[in-house]
Image (tube, rainbow, N blue to C red):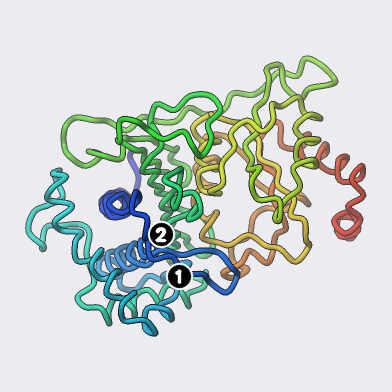
């Protein structure tokens, strides 16, 4: 890909490869050092270690850039044993890289990825991300493991890395360590790549989206990135379906505390889409499924008006879909605004579809909201 961000993309792929090796090294372990955060979501030693690895790498190469990440180091500072386990994973990055081979395993000066110099620096870097917010200038956003619950079961998860420039999605680099680069049709969290290659997707705004096998992406073995095809304009052929072909939904049916399956199914039926289609817990994996052409639409309406998306679950990954001809808004049709802080306070819920179908999918969503009596959402819509 001819992009002014070629350096950033190469660095990101390099460190995501190492993060994937790190995460896979303990994915089958019965003890992943799981703790529980204030919002009751789990975090593992791999989450902490990968955030330390990502932040060390990008802070080294781009020291003036801001950093935003999901985790903070409070628990590590309070628990020396937990910190020791995290540090053991970080220290082992070099040996894992050497065992895996590849082009990015030479002397420390020539490596693109970096590790913290000490436990204390690892904690400082994790905290730099944990207290960061999207703002003006260049800001990197990381989700070390999106889908920690599925990761703990040895299923689908993603490593998300995005660059925002003045709050605008500019780069996306996503590692899917156990998704096949040849994935076809509807996939679920259980559909693990038997070859172990994994997938990396990357995109720069206005330069398209691309796919590579994660293993060997920088090895110089002649593997060329495959550009993900742009969506073709759909031809409407009936009043009952917004497209001449069967549409496919991308959703998650395992988090009923967050969204309403019946409402989402009703939206899918109203647009003639299969449901659930791709059934994935990690949000980043859902956006990737859309970009890869494994699905056509995402509609997600939170059960509570107070609920907001977290920036690291969506930043960058949405750009992958947009660069293949997709459009993403909130449920009110407002453009996604990532300047709202660590949580996406300026938007509520998500509606995504190919650009030429988005208006109709949005309208059908509003019809279903009326059927389900979501006055809280509709009253806000009426104010806009």
**Residue 42: percent from left, percent from top:** 50, 63
Whether residue 234 is situated above or below residue 336 in the rendered picture: above
**Where does label 2 land, which residue?**
144
Q: Tell me if residue 7 can be seen.
A: no
Of all residues shown, which one is farthest toward the bottom?
78
Question: Residue 96: percent from the left, percent from the top?
Answer: 18, 53
10 Å crowding of disc 1: few (<14), some (14-19), many (20+): many
**Does label 1 or label 2 sit earlier along the sequence?**
1
Label 1 sits on residue:
71
Q: Do the CB atoms of the residues marked 1 and 2 lie less than 8 Å apart?
A: yes
Name the residue furthest front: 30
Q: Is residue 224 above or below residue 139?
A: above
**Measuring 44% from the left and 53% from the top, which residue is drawn there?**
152
In the image, 255: left or right of 306? Answer: left
Considering the numbered disc 2 on the image, is that residue within a helix, a strand or a loop? Answer: strand
* Residue at x 92%, y 42% (from the top left corner): 371
Q: Which mark is residue 46?
A: none
Instruction: Locate residue 126: give its quadrant.
Output: bottom left
Residue located 41% across and 71% down the image: 66
Residue positioned 71% across, 50% down in the render: 256
């Amino acid at each position: 890909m001819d992009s002014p961000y070629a350096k950033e993309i190469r660095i990101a792929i390099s460190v995501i490869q190492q993060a994937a090796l790190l995460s896979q090294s303990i994915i089958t372990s019965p003890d992943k050092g799981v703790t529980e955060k204030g919002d009751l979501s789990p975090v593992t030693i791999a989450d902490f270690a990968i955030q330390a690895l990502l932040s060390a790498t990008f802070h080294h190469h781009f020291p003036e850039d801001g950093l935003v990440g999901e985790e903070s180091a409070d628990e590590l500072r309070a628990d020396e044993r937990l910190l020791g386990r995290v540090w053991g994973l970080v220290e082992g990055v070099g040996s894992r890289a050497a065992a895996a081979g590849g082009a990015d395993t030479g002397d420390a000066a020539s490596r693109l990825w970096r590790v913290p110099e000490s436990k204390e620096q690892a904690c400082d870097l994790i905290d730099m991300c944990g207290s960061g917010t999207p703002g003006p200038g260049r800001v990197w956003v990381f989700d070390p493991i999106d889908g920690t619950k599925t990761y703990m079961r040895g299923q689908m998860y993603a490593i998300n890395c995005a660059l925002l420039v003045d709050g605008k999605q500019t780069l996306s680099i996503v590692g899917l360590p156990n998704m096949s680069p040849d994935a076809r049709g509807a996939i679920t969290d259980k559909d693990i790549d038997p070859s172990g290659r994994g997938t990396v997707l990357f995109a720069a705004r206005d330069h398209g989206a691309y796919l590579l096998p994660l293993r060997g992406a920088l090895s110089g073995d002649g593997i060329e990135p495959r550009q993900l095809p742009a969506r073709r304009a759909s031809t409407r052929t009936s009043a009952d379906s917004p497209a001449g072909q069967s549409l496919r939904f991308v959703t998650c049916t395992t988090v009923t505390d967050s969204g309403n399956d019946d409402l989402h199914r009703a939206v899918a039926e109203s647009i003639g889409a299969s449901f659930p289609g791709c059934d994935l817990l990690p949000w980043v994996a859902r956006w990737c499924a859309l970009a890869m052409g494994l699905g056509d639409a995402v509609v997600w309406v939170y059960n509570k008006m107070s609920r907001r998306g977290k920036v690291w679950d969506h930043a960058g990954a949405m750009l992958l879909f947009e660069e293949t001809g997709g459009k993403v808004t909130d449920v009110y049709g407002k453009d996604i605004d990532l300047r709202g802080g660590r949580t996406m306070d300026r938007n509520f819920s998500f509606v995504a579809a190919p650009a030429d179908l988005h208006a109709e999918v949005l309208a059908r969503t509003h019809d279903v909201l009326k059927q389900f009596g979501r006055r809280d959402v509709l009253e806000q819509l009426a104010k806009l």
